[in-house]
Image (tube, rainbow, N blue to C red):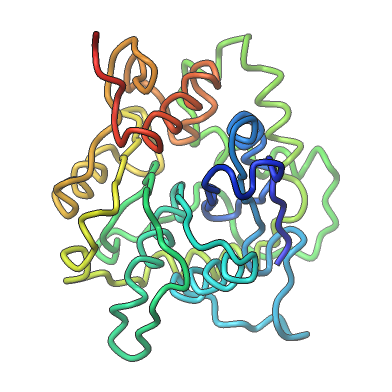
Amino acid sequence: MAYEVLGSEYLGHRQPIVLIGGMSSLRGDWERLATSLAHGRPVLVFDHRGMGDSTFSTPAKDDDITIESLARDIVFLVDALQWKEVSVCGFSMGGVIAQQILFLPYHPQNPSPLPFRVTHVLLTGTFSSGLRDKPFRLPINTSPSATRRSHEEKRELTRPILEASFDPQWLTNPVNAQRLDWWLDRMTSGRPMHTILMQLRALNSFNFSGLHNKIPQDIQFLVIHGELDQLVPFHRAQDILRRIPWAKPVEIGGLPGQVENLAFGHQWFEYFDIQVWRDVVETFLSHGGTIARL
């Protein structure tokens, strides 16, 4: 597994946070948020198995990729780093994986106590129950092709799913043009379709039935979900809050730890000034909620 620890100078002084990316993601996609958080704590970013600089375990690249196997990869990595207490932020598929990590001790066939304690979990742009009635689909043509594509062709191939990660107003705002171009360039390499399709199958086949009520209630949860999310509908956040009744939605307001509104798309940390999101994360990790009004 390819990984980086940003803010490593805070190891032993501040609790690390593990950022778990979504389907097709690479560790560098977290750059905007991870760099900001690393000014005050260790931040772990990594590439999922078979993505970016992380390899498969076999030359045939035929690993069985499931939500469970991806969760166990992360447990192995955190344990190898010898961290005993962490916070977790899971985005999209990463939020499903974050929940799976918490359920490993209650696995029906292979229960596995975690070798570290999870204190805080941020579930962002994600869901808590399967989509078998309406499978998750990628808004791109996933047909394999032997054609060698140019860089510009790759940019255009990935444009539909990238644009679905935002909303029309964000996309047409000239202020965001440079950032959109940055994302288009990032999406053209290190993301093999073979692996993405296996992740997609995993995302459409997990089953968390009866597990959420086993989560220890001393683990704090924050749910971040934009009303303009075109990939994971906003009502999925309400489902999480029903299944984890002590979880809190991100609050709206002008205080540190709050956001001005929920008018943001799937790629949540690309909206607002990054200091807003750093305050949301740090306030949650430090206090479990918004700083009290004076």
Look at the picture and state if 277 lies above or below 47. above
Could you say which is closer to the camera, residue 135 or residue 126? 126
Residue 286 is situated, as x and y percent measured from the top left of the image, at: 39, 34
Image quarter in which the C terminus is found: top left
Residue 249's place in the image compared with 254, above or below, is below
Q: Quadrant of the N terminus?
A: bottom right
Residue 45: x percent and y percent? 63, 50
Q: What residue is drawn where x is 77% and y is 61%? A: 53
Q: Which of 255 and 145 is in front in this view?
A: 255
Q: Locate residue 206: give its quadrant.
A: bottom left
Seen at 59% across and 59% down, the residue is 142
How many numbered badges does the structure rendering display?
0
Residue at x-position 55% and y-position 42%: 14
Which residue sits at x=64%, y=48%?
Answer: 11
Toward which corner of the image does residue 106 lie, by quadrant?
A: bottom left
Q: Relative to 234, is 113 on the left or the right?
A: right
What percent of the width, then of the height, locates residue 280?
41, 27
Residue positioned most to the front: 13
Residue 50 percent across, percent down from the top left: 68, 68
Camera sees residue 219: yes
> Taking 244 as reference, is 109 left or right?
right
18 and 162: which is toward the camera? 18
Does residue 130 appear to the left or right of 209 in the view shown? right
* Residue 33 seen anywhere in this rendered image of the structure: no
Q: Residue furthest bottom?
A: 109
47 with respect to 96 (left or right): right
Q: In this view, does 171 lie above or below 254?
A: below
